[in-house]
Amino acid sequence: MIYDLELFGRLTGNGAFVGNYTEVGRGWQRTIAAVGGYKLGSFYLSEEDLTLRELEAFYSQNLGYRLLEMTFGMESWEGLLYEFRLVKNGREYRRTLDPEWFHNRVIVYYSYPQTEDDEQGNLAYDPGGNDGFQDDGQDFGEWETAAGSAAYTIAVTNSDDTRAWGFLGAAFTTANADDSIYVYTDEALTDAGWSGETSGKTPSSYEVSSVSLAGSRLNTGWSENTDASDEYGEMNYIITRGGTTPEAAESLRDRELAACAWPRGRKMGGGVAGGGERRVQPAVLEVSVAGCGVTLNWRYQTSNLLRPASNLISTLVGNSEFITAGRIETNEMRSKVDCNPTPQRLGDAIEQVILDGDLEGNVWQGGVYAGREFVYEQAPTAVAYYERADGVLVDNGRIEVVPSLMEAGFLLLDEQAPTGGQPPGTSSAWDDPRVGYVDEVRFIADGNQLEYHLADEEESVTALERKLDRGLRRINR
């Protein structure tokens, strides 16, 4: 073989060499995309090559390990062991770094409720001749404003469905401690009384709301399992909710963190018990690998950014844990990522900037490549490769390409294509009917094959990536 599959420890550790899996890593294939760089890969390990104990140890210990593909001693692809599916005796087990199942740093965004409290007791207007509201079963001390502008409002619904409201002032005692509170028609608490007519009315329910926070978008702050972060890297996760209380939001955050801080093994699907003997098949461990660029989506951008595209790319990449900025070509077009009030994952925001292109309408490309460096550049304007009549790809020197060394993001001329001529007024290689832009390549080790995809107007790069993601998931089942 002209390539090797070498396994190393996690990015958070010393990255020590674990072993060479070229011979036992069956069915190896992987993709590279013009937008994204090293993307997806897969292989499987079988009990035909390893013992069941070795397969189970791999399943239990090696999630998140770094896989390096080497061709002629050069790095040609790199990724993380992202998901395991162990199938043995008709049962399937799964471990994954999918952020929906694994996250070790959690925050909840929520809207502060309009209703602070809805405890109802014996409601009464103006007990004892005061401009106030009294409830035997309530303690209004937590909502009072003794000085300054009101912090809370109260809205009362009467038994005849009429409503009245006011601003809450100081609490006082009628029957029980702080069971009554003064009410005003203005926030400055200078005009005592209620809005609307309350004389002769019978209150039936009420709601208390914060003047400044009701309906505001708030968050719980981050909570992190640092042991898990130290082991696997920091995997952030944002939960969004509608109106809820701070206590409920914090409880949700803490439950989510406790459940998902570690990538747990789970049995998938169901099973069949009994029924006599079943044929025992060799155990298989299916391994999905994700390019290291996947870690860009382990963190979020929470504030809006507006700046030149290349500067924006560098800033976003710089906020990641494992990816560094490599060759970043200058693109002065101002681009924006909109992350407030809805945060965006770093990788998603970066992809948006890449797809914006530039002011001249040029296509740009970028992704994570060798050394976990991010490359951002204008797509090429000259043909770099040719497809001969016999289907062989050659470079400008007419040298046959090495499939595992090919990267996406190049112009390919099909020497068999009809020569209909270019549209009038253009000499761009992009407009040559024989030329296509290759935005995705897949290396398939079995047969030393290279598959490529040409971008066109009928299918966007983003749609293609989703399709490839689904395709690899199907392969890995």
Image: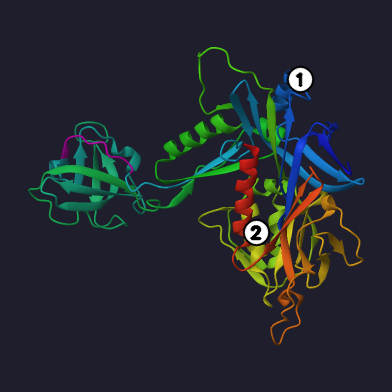
Secondary structure of the residue carrying numbered label 1? loop
Secondary structure of the residue carrying numbered label 2? helix
* Residue 341 appears in view: yes
Q: Are marks 1 and 2 in contact (CB under 8 Å)?
A: no
Residue 351 forms part of the magenta stretch: no
Residue sitting at 75 percent across and 79 percent down? Answer: 428
The percent position of residue 171, horizontal first and vertical second, equals 28, 41
Residue 351: image tag: 2
Q: In the rendered view, would you say 412 is above or below 441?
A: below
Disc 1 and disc 2: Cα gap in Å? 42 Å
Q: In the rendered view, would you say 381 is above or below 216?
A: below
Q: How is the image coloured?
A: rainbow
* Residue 235 appears in view: no
Count of numbered circles in the view: 2
* Residue extent of the magenta highlight: 116-123
The percent position of residue 81, horizontal first and vertical second, equals 72, 37
Considering the whole magenta stretch, tell me its main secondary structure. loop
Residue 122 forms part of the magenta stretch: yes
Q: Is residue 353 left or right of residue 171?
A: right
Residue found farthest to the bottom = 425
Query: Which amino acid type is shown beneath numbered disc 1?
Result: Thr
Query: Which amino acid type is shown beneath numbered disc 2?
Result: Glu
Residue found farthest to the left = 200
Q: Is residue 459 left or right of residue 80?
A: left
